[in-house]
Image: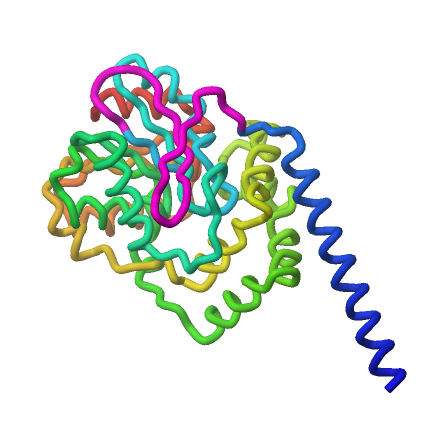
Amino acid sequence: MKKLKTTLALTGVAVGCLHLINKWITSNATLRNLLFKNNRKNYEWRFGNIYYTKTGEGSPLLLIHDLSPYSSSYEWNGLVEKLSKDHTVYCIDLLGCGRSDKPNITYTNFLYVQMVNDFVKNVIGQKTNIIATGLSSSFIVMACHLEQDLYNKIMMINPEDLSKLRGIPSKYSKLTKVLMDFPIIGTTIYNIISNKDNIEFLFTEEYLYNPFNVKEKYINVYHEAAHLGQCGGKYLLSSLNGSYINTNITYALKELNHSIFILSGSKRDGAEEIVTEYTEFNSAIETEYIKNTKFLPQLEDPESVLKQIKVFF
């Protein structure tokens, strides 16, 4: 009995220490308040508040960042002011990301389809042009297919590999999600995954081509975004790792009659193969590469991206 009491006491102390460490990590990561904006707005959606900004005048243009717990509308910082000269620019933080709410739910592709369509209908209120990055491009294709009259032209920056989008949850991925969704253990795992060193690795190996273009502020902003909302981003990460956000978009891609443009970083691994696969399903898709960039050309070479946006829109 004494051994059991001692074990329980030590377990309680260990769990308590983990909880305090997690709280400290969150507080330290969000201390700088780098993502604060004066012109911020909230769209009260049924699954949580969606943070967004609205700037400029002209035809509406909705910018949607890549879907990851580290991402936010900061991704578009180098373009918003210039795009606002010709467009009313809406930048949102997706549910589970940045300054938006991060509820404890299973995030799916269709959840984001509903979110974006509702935002266009209830906030923008008219047919809009849209630009999305990475995995977010998949639910933009589905959103446009579901409600085609809401959208005009579509630009996808480095869209996800179609073969990856066909992946479905496995027993292992489901178990991973359950583990990460635990209150303290899951948060600890999330904090280990989303530490600054790992985010810096993402920037140097995947996001940007030239390591000298990686700014410390980028790492700090992405680190802060990952830890806002008491590390609620772990629920999005567990859904991503569990393959719950994947969906086969090939049928929708074939059916779309919108003007579609794919912009890809020339140095992204597998860029040409991914673009070729998309154009095989929809031959009307226009494509262009931004030289010497990888996954986030809008951060690495915003001027070149801006030129392509102006030509297309």
Q: Position of residue 307 (x, y in %)?
A: 30, 20
Please check the rendered image and state whether residue 60 is part of the magenta-colored stretch, yes or no: yes
Which residue is at the front of the view, 233 or 134? 233
Occupied quadrant, residue 126: top left
Left or right, residue 9 beside residue 100: right
Secondary structure of the magenta portion, mostly? Answer: strand
**Which of the pair 143/206 is nearer the observer?**
143
Q: Is residue 174 magenta?
A: no
Q: Residue furthest right?
A: 2
Quarter location, residue 240:
bottom left
Q: Tell me the residue at 53%/32% (across/down).
A: 210
Q: If the image is split into quadrants, where does the N terminus sit?
A: bottom right
Point out residue 213 in the picture as x, y percentages from the top left corner.
55, 27
**Which residue shows up at 49% across the image and 73% down it?**
172
Query: Where is residue 25 drawn, in percent x and y?
Result: 70, 45
Residue range highlighted in magenta: 36-61
